[in-house]
């Protein structure tokens, strides 16, 4: 029970501080950062995962 309470407090602490860290910007940097590189990797990973799941579903239906 004590471990679960500690986890809850830690999760609350992180969820309160995360927006502060995520919105921080260093002075003099370019605010228009490109998001293409990471976004395209996420799309490719999602497509690969979807194809894998479709293949598993077909194999399961054939059995």
Image (cartoon, rainbow, N blue to C red):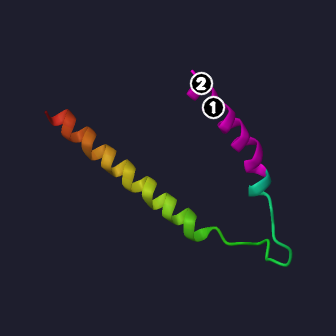
Question: Label 2 vs label 1: CA separation?
Answer: 6 Å
Instruction: State the residue at coordinates (66%, 38%).
Output: 10
Q: Are marks 2 and 1 in contact (CB under 8 Å)?
A: yes
> Magenta residues: mostly which secondary structure?
helix
Picture coordinates of residue 55 (x, y %)?
26, 46
Tell me the number on the disc at residue 61: none
Q: Nearer the viewer, residue 53 or 9?
A: 9
Residue 35 sits in quarter: bottom right
The residue beneath circle 2 is 2
Q: Label 2: few (<14), some or many (≥20) within 10 Å?
A: few
As drawn, the residue found furthest toward the left would be 63
Most extreme residue toward the front is 2
Q: Which residues are magenta?
A: 1-19
Q: Residue at x 63, y 26 (%)?
A: 5
In the rendered image of this protein, does residue 26 appear above or below residue 18? below
Above or below 42: residue 58: above
Q: Is residue 13 toward the left or the right of residue 1 in the image?
A: right
Image location (x, y in percent) of residue 25: 81, 66
SS label for mark 1: helix
Q: State the residue position of label 1.
A: 6
Q: Secondary structure at mark 2?
A: helix
Q: Residue at x 57, y 63 (%)?
A: 39
63 displayed left or right of 42: left
């Amino acid at each position: 029970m004590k471990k679960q309470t500690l986890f809850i407090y830690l999760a609350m602490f992180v969820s309160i501080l995360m927006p502060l860290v995520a919105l921080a910007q260093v002075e003099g940097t370019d605010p228009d950062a490109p998001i293409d590189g990471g976004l395209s990797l996420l799309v490719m990973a999602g497509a690969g995962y979807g194809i894998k799941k479709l293949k598993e579903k077909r194999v399961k239906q054939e059995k």
